[in-house]
Amino acid sequence: MNTVKIKAARKPRVRRPYHHGDLPERLVEVAEAVIRERGVDGFSLREVVRRAGVSPAAPAHHFGDARGLLSEVALRGFRAFGDALAAADARGGTDPEKRLYEQGLAYVTFALKHPARFQLMFRHGKYDIGYKDLPAASERAYQVLEDAVRAAMGLAAGEPMTDDANGFLMATWSVVHGFAHLALGEELTRPARARGGKDQVLQALLPLTLKHLPRPKRPR
């Protein structure tokens, strides 16, 4: 008896849609990847949509537009940044200089670990600074630094910051922030190589730099 072999029809692959609650996380994740690769100025919502495999209208439900998505990335960045600085400040104990040293380590470590968030956080023109809880998250991170500076200058909470205190704060912030950008831009590759490799940026060059932070000059 003749038999006929019938091949089962191959079912077309169907892309599983993201669960409604997962899509915002996916969009934030992809947005950070695009920023890491292209920089903040090269960010494109169209590219995020393409990589996420969703319709062009999908982000609108959660973030409105590209600026809204970047605002969410910045918010998450400042929240995590504030947590890192607060933990570092606690490690410094009651010694103001130790607190600032630990904050400096945490500051640069965060920048290197989360380059996309860090680059975006300080580009206010790219997102809505009034977005959700972003102002409070940003202020909290700044306040951690100011509190350590107040302790170093002998200023109580609520007491007006003096010109010297503000100058000390800006000098300390500038050193650490500048180092972070040098490290992100790989300008420190050569001195790091001379000390044994890329890891030396954090293991040797940063601690060495932080030893030269400005010293507070308390009023007499």
Image (cartoon, rainbow, N blue to C red):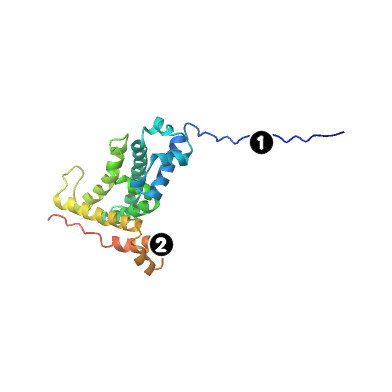
Element class at badge 2: loop
Residue 166 pos. (x, y %): 18, 50
Q: CA distance from mark 1 to mark 2?
A: 51 Å
Q: Earlier along the polypeptide chain: callout 1 or callout 2?
A: 1
- Identify which amino acid the numbered label 1 is placed on: Arg
Foreground residue among 105 and 27: 27
Residue 2 pos. (x, y %): 85, 34
Q: Residue furthest top?
A: 61
Q: Residue furthest right?
A: 1
Residue drawn at x 38%, y 49% is 38
Q: Is residue 216 visible?
A: yes
- Identify which amino acid the numbered label 2 is placed on: Asp
**Quadrant of the drawing holding the C terminus:** bottom left
Residue drawn at x 46%, y 35% is 23
Tell me which corner region of the image, top left, top right, bottom left or bottom right, holds residue 187. bottom left
Tally of numbered discs: 2
Q: Which mark is residue 199?
A: 2
Residue 183 pos. (x, y %): 34, 58
Foreground residue among 37 and 105: 37
Residue drawn at x 43%, y 34% is 56
Q: Circle 1: is it few (<14), some (14-19), or many (20+) Cα within 10 Å?
A: few
Q: Which mark is residue 10?
A: 1
Foreground residue among 59 and 176: 59
- Left or right of residue 176: residue 33: right
Q: Is residue 28 visible?
A: no
Residue 179 pos. (x, y %): 30, 57
